[in-house]
Image (cartoon, rainbow, N blue to C red):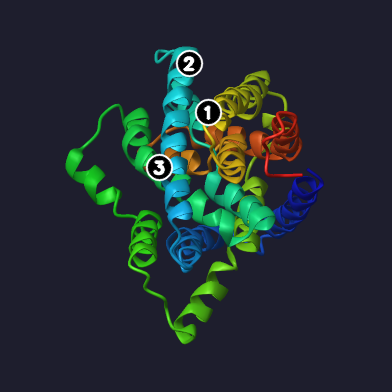
Amino acid sequence: MQAVITKIAVMFIMMAIGFLLGKLKIITNDGNRVLSNISLFLVSPLLSFVSYQREFSPSIAKNLLVTLGLTALLYVVQIAVVLLMIPKKRCGSAIERMSLIFSNCGYIGIPLVQSVFGNDGIIYLTMNIAVFYILTWTLGVSLMTGKISVKQTAKNLCTPAILAVVLGVIFFVLKIDLPDIIHEPLQSIGDMNTPLAMLIAGSTLAGTNLIGCLKKLRVYLLSLVRLILLPLICAAILFCFSFAGADPMVLTIVLIAAACPSAVITTMFSHRFGGDSVYASEIFAITTILSAATIPLIMWIFSLTGISAVI
C-alpha cells in the first residue's frame, strides 16, 4: 500500500508541474493538444506493444483472457448502474453518463500500474485499454450524439492503441522478438508515458476554472459515484472471482483501472460532438484531484480481503 501512495504522490508532483507550465502558458492549449496526440498516437501505443515483447507463457496468455473477460464484465455492470442512476432526460446526462462509465485508465492507469508492477502489469492493462477504446468509440459516441454510424465506428476502432495491442499479441503468440536496435528506441519512447501523461493532465487542469467547479455540489456527488461507489462494486465482484483462482495481480490491475478518475476523452468528445466541454472538464478536474486520496483508499479496502497484489 505504501508503494501505491508513494507512486501517486510522485505522479501528482509531475501533474503539478504540468499545471504550473499550463498557468505560465509554457504549455499552451495548442501545445497541450500536440502533446496529447503524441501520447495518444505514439507513446502509449508503443508502451503497450513493447510490453508484449517477452517469452511466450501459457499463464500470461491465460491471464490476458481473464483480464479481458473481467474488464468486459465490470464495464457491463458499471454501464447498467450509471444508466439507471442518471436519467436520459436530465440536462447534461450524456456528459455525466460518459464521465462516470469511463475511467482515465490510460493517462492515470498506465503510469500507476507501470510504477507499481512495471511492464509485467502493463501487458494486462492493455486489455482494459482495448475494451475502453472499443466502448468509447461505440457507446461513448452514441451517448454524445444520440446516434451511431456503423461505417464510422469501424473506422474509429482502427486506433493506434487497439492496433498496438493486436500487433503485440500477434508478436507474443508467434514468439517474434524485435532486434535490440529496434526494441531499445521503441522502449525508450514508451518510457516517456508517465511524465508526458502527467504533464498533459496537469496542463489540462490549468485550463479549468477550478474555483468555479469547486463550488458545484453536483460535481462532488458524481465524483463520489465515480471514485467510491463504482470501484467498491467492482472490488466486490473481483473478490468473488478470487475464489476461482484468478491471479491477484490481474485482479489488482483491473481494480486500479476501475478506480481511476473520469476519462479526459469525455472532454475531447464534448469538443468534437458539440457537448458541454466546460462541464466535462469540471468533472475531470475534481475527480482527478480527489483520486489522489480515493485510489489509495480503494486499494487499502481491497487489501483487507487478503488478495491484493499491492502491499
Q: Earlier in the sequence, mark 3 or mark 2?
A: 2
Residue type (three-letter) at the residue carrying disc 2: Ile
Residue corresponding to mark 3: 131
For the C terminus, which image quadrant?
Answer: top right
Task: Report x, y in % for residue 146.
Answer: 30, 26
What is the quadrant of residue 258 in the picture? top right
Q: Count neighbours of disc 3 (C-alpha within 10 A) and say few if under 14, some if 14 to 19, many if 20 or more.
A: some
Q: CA distance from mark 1 to mark 2?
A: 10 Å
Q: Secondary structure at mark 2?
A: loop
Q: Do callouts 3 and 2 mark residues in contact (Cβ within 8 Å)?
A: no
What is the quadrant of residue 133 in the picture? top left
Residue corresponding to mark 1: 100
Q: Earlier in the sequence, mark 1 or mark 2?
A: 2
For the N terminus, which image quadrant?
Answer: top right
Q: Do callouts 1 and 2 mark residues in contact (Cβ within 8 Å)?
A: yes
Residue 124 vertical placement versus 218 (above, below): below
Residue type (three-letter) at the residue carrying disc 1: Leu
Residue at the image position 37 percent from the left and 31 percent from the top: 144
Residue corresponding to mark 2: 86
Q: Secondary structure at mark 3?
A: helix
Q: Earlier in the sequence, mark 3 or mark 1?
A: 1
Q: Count neighbours of disc 2 (C-alpha within 10 A) and say few if under 14, some if 14 to 19, many if 20 or more.
A: some
Closer to the eye: label 3 or 2 = 3
Depth order, front residue of 106/167: 167
Q: In the rendered image, is residue 203 in sight?
A: no
Depth order, front residue of 230/27: 230
Task: Report x, y in % for residue 251.
Answer: 57, 39
Residue 253 vertical placement versus 203 (above, below): above
Task: Report x, y in % for residue 284.
Answer: 59, 37
Q: Secondary structure at mark 1?
A: helix
Residue at the image position 37 percent from the left and 73 percent from the top: 176
